[in-house]
Image (cartoon, grey):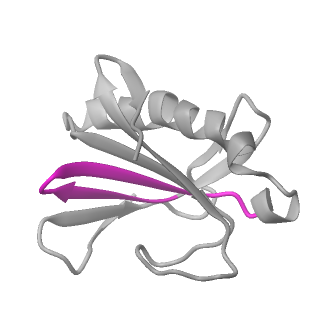
Amino acid sequence: MRAALIIAIGCTAVAGGVGASDVSLTSGHTVELIEVIHEDAPMVSRFRFLNEGIASQGLSFEDIEPDLHELCERYALPRLAEEQRLPEQVVISISDRILPFGEISPDATQYFDAFTIEGARCMWEQF
């Protein structure tokens, strides 16, 4: 993995190589890690994933929501533990295309959810 600085104070990003971080999910979907962004104030870790088929397969948020939770508990938490990082919040997103963080595109399909960490569990956080 390679590290890169995001142009913002207190943020770092870690990007995966193409195909290097494919994750097969219980739902049968496969996602690829785009990047991880750690923000320091407040302490938030954002795990951004790619699934190019979510739009073409007509997948709704309800279809993807269990994947978001699984990615938080099965993917994000172990990596945060390895880094000895305990953020206040973890945000998991899955999109059908790679967009720079924060960029909006009306053609993109993107789903995300936020979680607080309680022990070894990701607890859904209502916006």
Identify the residue at horizontal 76%, vertical 32% (top origin).
27
Residue 35: % across, % down:
44, 61
Tell which residue pokes out farthest to the right in this image: 57
Q: Quadrant of the N terminus?
A: bottom left
| Along the line of sight, the residue nearer the viewer: 14 or 102 | 102
Residue 125: % across, % down:
39, 37
Describe residue 90's horizontal placement relative to residue 113 as left or right.
left
Identify the residue at horizontal 15%, vertical 52% (top origin).
42
Tell which residue pokes out farthest to the front in this image: 127
Identify the residue at horizontal 22%, vertical 40% (top origin).
87
| Magenta span | 34-52
| Along the line of sight, the residue nearer the viewer: 75 or 123 | 123
Residue 116 lies within the magenta run: no
* Vertical arrangement, residue 24 with respect to residue 92, above or below: above
Residue 43 lies within the magenta run: yes
Number of disc labels: 0
Residue 14: % across, % down:
35, 60
Look at the magenta stretch and give its main secondary structure: strand
| Along the line of sight, the residue nearer the viewer: 28 or 3 | 28
- Figure quadrant of residue 55: bottom right
Identify the residue at horizontal 52%, vertical 52% (top origin).
112
Tell which residue pokes out farthest to the top in this image: 119
Describe residue 107's horizontal placement relative to residue 90 as left or right.
right
Residue 89: % across, % down:
29, 42
Describe residue 58's horizontal placement relative to residue 49 as left or right.
right
* Vertical arrangement, residue 35 with respect to residue 47, above or below: below
